[in-house]
């Protein structure tokens, strides 16, 4: 199962800079960049922190690749 990260779009819509967000959730800037560019998936702990900080569900941030929009 493949996933597509919508974090880049979400941060842009909420006018949040990646560096500020990385500090807020306690994840390195490189780690957030890797997620945003779909180069990696988060650990459960990091996904939880991201979802909690944004007030969103995990499926709103990571979509299955084969889902139709």
Image (spheres, grey):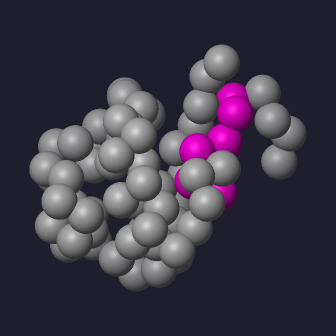
In magenta segment, residue 29:
no
User: In terms of image quadrants, where is residue 48?
Assistant: bottom left
Q: Is residue 7 left or right of residue 63?
A: left
Camera sees residue 7: yes
Q: Which residues are magenta?
A: 60-65
In the image, taking residue 22 as reference, residue 1 lies left or right, namely right
Q: Is residue 3 above or below residue 31?
A: above
What residue is drawn where x is 19% and y is 53%?
Answer: 27
Residue drawn at x 65%, y 18% is 1
Using the rendered view, name the quadrant where residue 15 is placed: bottom left
- The part of the image, by quadrant, that contains residue 40 is top left
35 or 56: nearer the viewer = 56
Task: Name, please, the residue furthest toward the bottom.
Answer: 15
Q: Is residue 43 above or below residue 7?
A: above
Residue 66: percent from left, percent from top: 78, 27
- Image x and y of residue 69, in percent: 83, 48
Residue 8, visible in the rendered structure: no
* Extreme residue toward the right, this view: 68
Q: Is residue 14 above or below residue 24?
A: below
Q: Is residue 51 left or right of residue 65?
A: left
Q: Position of residue 7 (x, y in %)?
A: 47, 56
Residue 17, compared with residue 65, is above or below; it is below
**In the depicted view, which residue is nearer to us: 45 or 65?**
45
> How many numbered marks does the figure carry?
0
In the image: residue 38, left or right of residue 34: right
Residue 17: x and y in percent read 28, 72
Q: In percent of the image, x 58 and y 37: which residue is there?
A: 4
């Amino acid at each position: 199962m493949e996933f597509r990260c919508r974090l880049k779009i979400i941060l842009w819509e909420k006018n949040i800079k990646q560096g500020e967000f990385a500090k807020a959730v306690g994840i390195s800037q490189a780690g957030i960049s890797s997620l945003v560019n779909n180069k990696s998936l988060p650990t459960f702990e990091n996904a939880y922190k991201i979802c909690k900080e944004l007030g969103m569900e995990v499926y709103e941030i990571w979509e299955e690749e084969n889902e139709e929009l």
